[in-house]
Amino acid sequence: MDTREMNRRAMRILEEWDPFAIGTDLYDTEIVGVVGALQVLDDPSDLAKKIQSIYEFSFEKWIPLERCVEISYKLLALKFEAKCII
């Protein structure tokens, strides 16, 4: 799996995640930010905090860190799968 494919899969995971229950098609900007953070972060806690920050900045609403950690583990599993296949 190359980086582009990993990014596409990460975007699909994030598109399905609807942390504010407002509809899955309203998070495009945040998804791009999280995928960018995924490129440089390998620690689930660091990525979770970044996810929390990105969504909070855009929506001025707070997501519990535990929910961000859940999604960060999914994204990092995808990232490490991509690294192992390359």
Image (cartoon, rainbow, N blue to C red):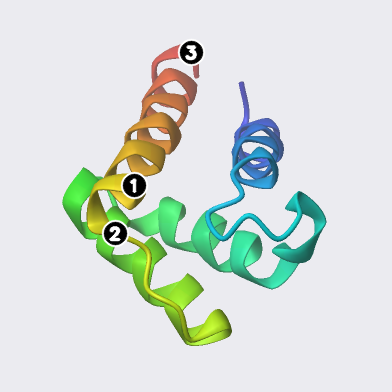
Say which residue appears at 67% left-offset and 39% top-offset. 16
Residue at mark 3:
85
Task: Find numbered disc 1 in the image and state the secondary structure of the residue it sits on.
Answer: helix
Q: Earlier in the sequence, mark 1 or mark 3?
A: 1
**Three-letter code, disc 2:** Pro
Residue at mark 2:
64
**Three-letter code, disc 1:** Arg
Say which residue appears at 70% left-offset and 61% top-offset. 22
Q: Earlier in the sequence, mark 3 or mark 2?
A: 2
**Three-letter code, disc 3:** Ile
Q: Look at the image and tell me whether residue 43 can be seen.
A: no
Residue at mark 1:
67
x and y percentages locating residue 41 in the rendered image: 30, 54
53 in relation to 24, above or below: below
Say which residue appears at 33% left-offset and 37% top-offset. 70
Q: Look at the image and tell me whether residue 12 can be seen.
A: yes
27 in relation to 53, above or below: above
